[in-house]
Image (tube, grey):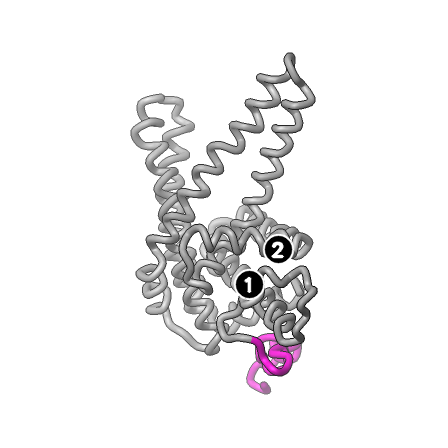
Amino acid sequence: MLGRALKMAFWVTYDHLGKLVIASLLWSLSVSIPAMAGVTAFVSHDPGLQLVVGIPCLVLCIGVVLPVMSAGIAHMVKELIDTRDGSLRTMLEGIRLYWRRAIGVGFAYLAALVCLPTSVWFYASKLREQAPLVGYALSALALWCLLFIGLMSLLVVPTLVQKKANLFQTLKLTALLVLDNPLFSVGLAMQVLAFTAIAVVLSPVFFFLYGGMVVALTCSAYEMLARKYDAAADTGDAGSKSSHVRGLGTQGAEAHDPDEDDDYLNRGLRDFLFPWKG
């Protein structure tokens, strides 16, 4: 399933490279400006500058700009997957439609990123003398939760855009998807980490493609999960452990395998080398 998601993401990017480059450029500039300002303030070791500039800039970046811009690109990629066509106007429409809920997601993650790492340190250090086993167990639990929300972060924006649900329902469904597909989620995380490493090594050239490529991959991953659960619903597998997240897709179950008619999933090297012969 991860291989199909990668293949779909590749051909979506290949077919609509110009749109995704512009969208990625807007994403990169929007995210990097407050992020760089915040990091610069923190490395200055000036407490006043850190308080007045550093914290607000990082909150703006993580809590507002990153989720809102990602939701806009996800809305555009959804259209590219569904209709094989789209425009940058769709990205702006996605920002307009989802900015409130995207900010809610961003601040929920901000709270988790503040509380969980603090908990990892606090329980291990403060309970080391009185109850070391309890302290280490609580620290391990907090670390596991931190890793879990990291996996959730890969699917939360596509879930928000596809399901159009409120904050709680979006987070709940995303958590269920990760719990039901742990290996797929870990594999997806490894691919995103690989893209991130390439973006750092080839920066700044590749960095301006990073946002669109990652969102295209995560939206393609969501599409594969949607087809999986639609197929489970179509076969009437009532005993499936996946029943709690059925109805994931937005168009309902198909009577046949949708991959058979998917142009993104039925191309090969020949189509890449000789696109005019397709």
Q: Where residue 118 appears, x then y in whole percent?
A: 51, 28
Q: Where residue 158 appears, x then y in whole percent?
A: 48, 60
Q: Where residue 26 appears, x then y in whole percent?
A: 37, 57
Residue type indicated by callout 2: Leu
Residue type indicated by callout 1: Tyr
Q: Quadrant of the C terminus?
A: bottom right
Residue 108 within the segment the image draws in magenta: no
Q: Is residue 105 left or right of residue 225?
A: left
| Mark 1 / mark 2, whichever is N-terminal | 2
Q: Is residue 160 left or right of residue 226?
A: left
Residues rendered magenta in the picture: 253-278
Dot label at residue 188 = 2
Dot label at residue 206 = none
Q: On the image, which quarter does residue 85 sit in?
A: bottom left
Residue at the disc numbered 1: 222
Could one spot residue 273 in this view of the protein? no
Q: On the image, which quarter does residue 43 sit in?
A: top left
Select label 1 or label 2 by which is in front: 1
Q: Which residue sits at x=39%, y=26%?
A: 44
